[in-house]
């Protein structure tokens, strides 16, 4: 069973999503719905900090990120369990430039 926490900070226009444990497809849908609902409290250009480093199963929020882009998502920061995480190797130069501001 997954444990998730969503912290929305309208004053700083950012959201932190933490997932831990095994995430079933139904839990992933529940998390996504909650994140989308919370995102409406933020202004266009908001930042998402996504920590799925302790999650297993359906922890990929790629589709959710695309939906959030429709709500004005700006930058995404993904917390990785380690530098060897598959997601780190797949980051494109474009994403790295966006994250670093280069």
Image (spheres, rainbow, N blue to C red):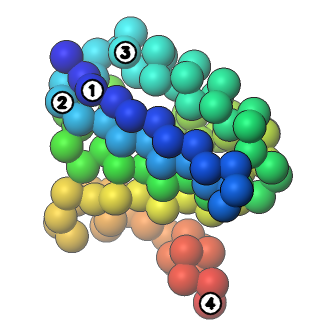
Q: Residue 3 carries which label?
A: 1
Q: How far apart are marks 1 and 3 (CA)?
A: 9 Å
Q: Could you classify mark 1 by the number of other residues whose Cα lies within 10 Å: few (under 14), some (14-19), or many (20 or more)?
A: some
Q: Classify residue 56 as left or right of residue 90.
A: left
Q: Earlier in the sequence, mark 1 or mark 3?
A: 1
Q: Which residue was labeled with disc 2? A: 21
Q: Which residue was labeled with disc 4? A: 102
State the residue at coordinates (47%, 36%): 6
Q: Earlier in the sequence, mark 4 or mark 2?
A: 2
- Quarter that holds the N terminus: top left
Q: Which of marks 3 and 2 is nearer the N terminus?
A: 2
Label pair 3/4, CB-CB below 8 angstroms: no
- SS label for mark 1: strand
Q: Could you classify mark 3 by the number of other residues whose Cα lies within 10 Å: few (under 14), some (14-19), or many (20 or more)?
A: some
Q: Earlier in the sequence, mark 3 or mark 4?
A: 3
State the residue at coordinates (61%, 50%): 9
Label pair 4/1, CB-CB below 8 angstroms: no
Q: Which residue was labeled with disc 3? A: 27
State the residue at coordinates (66%, 25%): 37
Give the quarter of the image for residue 12: bottom right
User: Residue 89 or 30: which is nearer the viewer?
Assistant: 30
> Residue 61: in sight, yes or no?
no
């Amino acid at each position: 069973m997954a444990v998730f926490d969503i912290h929305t900070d309208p004053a700083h226009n950012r959201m932190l999503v933490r997932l831990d444990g095994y995430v079933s497809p139904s839990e992933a849908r529940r998390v996504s719905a909650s994140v989308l609902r919370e995102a409406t409290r933020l202004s266009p250009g908001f930042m998402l900090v996504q920590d799925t480093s302790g999650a297993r199963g359906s922890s990929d929020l790629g589709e959710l990120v695309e939906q959030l882009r429709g709500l004005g998502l700006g930058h995404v920061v993904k917390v990785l369990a380690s530098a060897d995480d598959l997601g780190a190797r797949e980051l494109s130069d474009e994403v790295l430039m966006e994250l670093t501001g280069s």
